[in-house]
Image (cartoon, helix red, strand yellow):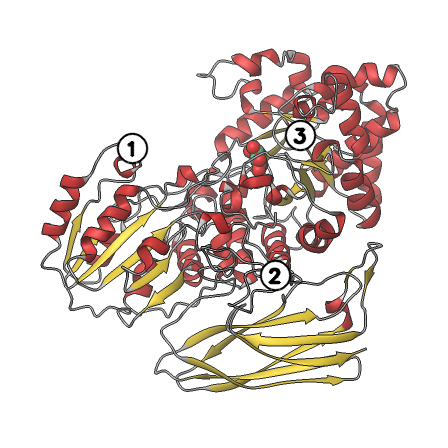
Amino acid sequence: MNLLSSARIENLLSQMTLDEKLAEMTQLSPLFFGAWSSIDLTGPLKEMDVSQREIKNLGSTLNYFGAKDTKALQDKHLADSRLKIPLLFMADVIHGYQTVFPIPLALGCSFNPENYRIASSTAAKESAASGIHLTFSPMVDLVRDPRWGRVMESTGEDSYLNSLMAAAAVKGFQGDNPAEKGRVASCVKHFAGYGASEGGRDYNWVELSENSLRQYYLPSYKSAVDAGCKMVMTSFNVIDGVPASANKKLFRDILRDEWGFKGATISDYAAIDETITNGLAENGSEAARLCIEAGVDIEMMSTHYIHHGKQLVESGKLSVEQIDSSVRNILQLKEDLGLFENPYKDASEEDEKKLFLCAEHRAAARKVARECAVLLKNDGTLPLKKNLKVGVAGPYAHSGNTNGGWSIAGDKDSLSLAETIKTHGVPVVTAMSQGLGSMQEGIMDCADEIDAAVNALRDCDVIIAAVGESPLDTGEAASKTSLRLSCNQEKMIFALAELKKPMIVICLSGRPLEIKPILHRANAFLQAWFLGSESPGAIADILFGDYNPCGRLSMSFPQTVGQIPVYYNGYHTGRPNNDPTNRFVSRYLDCPNEPLFPFGYGLSYSDVVYSDFKATVSGDEIQASITVTNNSDINTREAVQLYVRDLFASVVRPVKELKGIALTTLAPHEKRTVHFVIGKDMLRFHNNKLEFVFEPGEFEIMIGKNSAELTGARLHFE
Ligand code: BGC
């Protein structure tokens, strides 16, 4: 905070009435400002009963964009605002804006934080040109349950990987200074623990020990805070008995006091009102008091601050200082974004035209998308030769919309996969490509279409089944108990398999699905997630070997839903499953303990061999290395992974934890030695007094291709 800015803020604070301050602390949708005038304020929105005077002083709005419209709204707002405080435009710019990048779960699979940085900086340029000042991103909730639709917004199940990705995203959005042209401020969400919603049901409560919360769930939020993100959003869940939006321990003790966060905080959508439904606050007044006391500066989409704040101050239940401290954080954010000098920031219709989906942004999206797809199976069918006749069947054969959930803008009409394959000069026949709608469960029986598809593809040399889930089945409020493909899609795959042609399944989904029933019918299986605007091009690059796949799973694939949660870094039980003759061990009778595909797993077209593992203690560090050899005639990229186990400690430690990733590019037949250095800091954990400590003793150091295929050694380290 520079002196000049703090003088401006203090000056404004001294002139603001209490009502104006409470309105500054409130965020409402553009509807309240008369935007989208064709839609009337009805139902719950009308019940919010906000006066015109209050609207004139609101501090921010959400999900309103477009250079022309945001400028017009800003002009109107400034004309009405007594103290000329600019309106802050916030929006969910999650994985790209007009040029859409892969969903965050897929970005995680690139194991390359630089990709999240590129996606975010490109999104920042485009959205800033559209008048957006702050994005509600990154979402860094650690996820272990694919029944939860929001796993698509996270980078996965590992705290270390998530932390690297979180920092990269913040840097991408904000650069060194969010006030600069083409940058937006970043809001990390959802603080905290939302990814552990019980049973994978959205908005559900969370049961976590403080040890687990600190050890696994909090590091990614902290990483975003350390990277300088300007805002933190609450989560919908109750945690330790208290809704996150009223959780003083999270927002004051941990975020501000322990981590030193100086930015602004915001509730999630109507989450302050929901503390009443949760059964914490008895009424709106208590909800406002509890959430302001907890340190939540902005109330998003409910109105208890403006309606009850004044009375709470007048009755002495809240102090003016508490209100001022929140308003100061919000004004500081506006100051940091340069809005007092230029309230439009980068809004420019000309820049919108220049930047949206421009060649440079598309090239970046293609580069990133190719690194995010994960090849899960290949018997040599891939890469395809270009002289084959290809049959493409399934709902994603002709769908140009592969953006996935949370794409607020974006080109919904790019070339489809089938059309893109044709551009490679390959003859293509399509079948059953009528879209997902008609292939959903219970909608219709597709038996006739399936017969027709089998006939249509009979002459093809190879079959591609482009299947998956609807983008609407992923994201918020999209929890499911079955993770299988729709019955019609499975039947289509079974029927096509009868043709005995090589079959490649390409799966577009926002979560790990239960793919076991179809996997053995497929000669190759590419998990393509939702890769964004350049999805078909990126997939075709991989299919034809123009790009050697290198994605690695950032979330384990379950064998069956009944196995969930299944993740790589659990604990050892006292009865490990290593004796098939003993019934009384920790296992399922009908399913292995291991996932179908583990965290970190992914194939390429190259045979990369790991050898010469070494690990030694050298003074205050452990040095470990491994040699990787590319036994193929093409370039390849390996994500060499380092895992550690603390064998005996004052609290039980996971069977392994990712501690390092070395992205290693290998030329044909190149051999390279990859080195890791493990310091004591990397081995710290929360003991049973919640102190963050290193405990000397026995460690297992492991390096390999994924969390299950590792070579390791045991060392004493103190
Ligand atoms: C979501 C947030 C999002 C907000 C604003 C909420 O429903 O949980 O992630 O940022 O809406 O759109």
According to the picture, the residue beneath numbered tag 2 turns out to be: 569
Q: Residue at 76% across / 41% down in the picture?
A: 250
**Which x, y percent locates residue 246?**
75, 31
Decide: marks 2, 3 in contact (CB < 8 A)? no
Q: Quadrant of residue 537?
A: bottom left
626 displayed left or right of 671: right
> Which badge, 3 or 1, is on the more N-terminal residue?
3
Image vertical order of residue 151 relative to residue 62, above or below: below
According to the picture, the residue beneath numbered tag 1 turns out to be: 442
Tag 3: residue type?
Pro
Element assignment for label 2: loop
According to the picture, the residue beneath numbered tag 3 turns out to be: 86
Q: Nearer the viewer, residue 576 or 710?
A: 576
Q: Count residues near mark 2 (Cα–Cα under 10 Å), then give few for <14, some for 14-19, many for 20+.
A: some
> Which badge, 2 or 3, is on the more N-terminal residue?
3
Q: Quadrant of residue 616?
A: bottom right
**Which x, y percent locates residue 659?**
64, 68
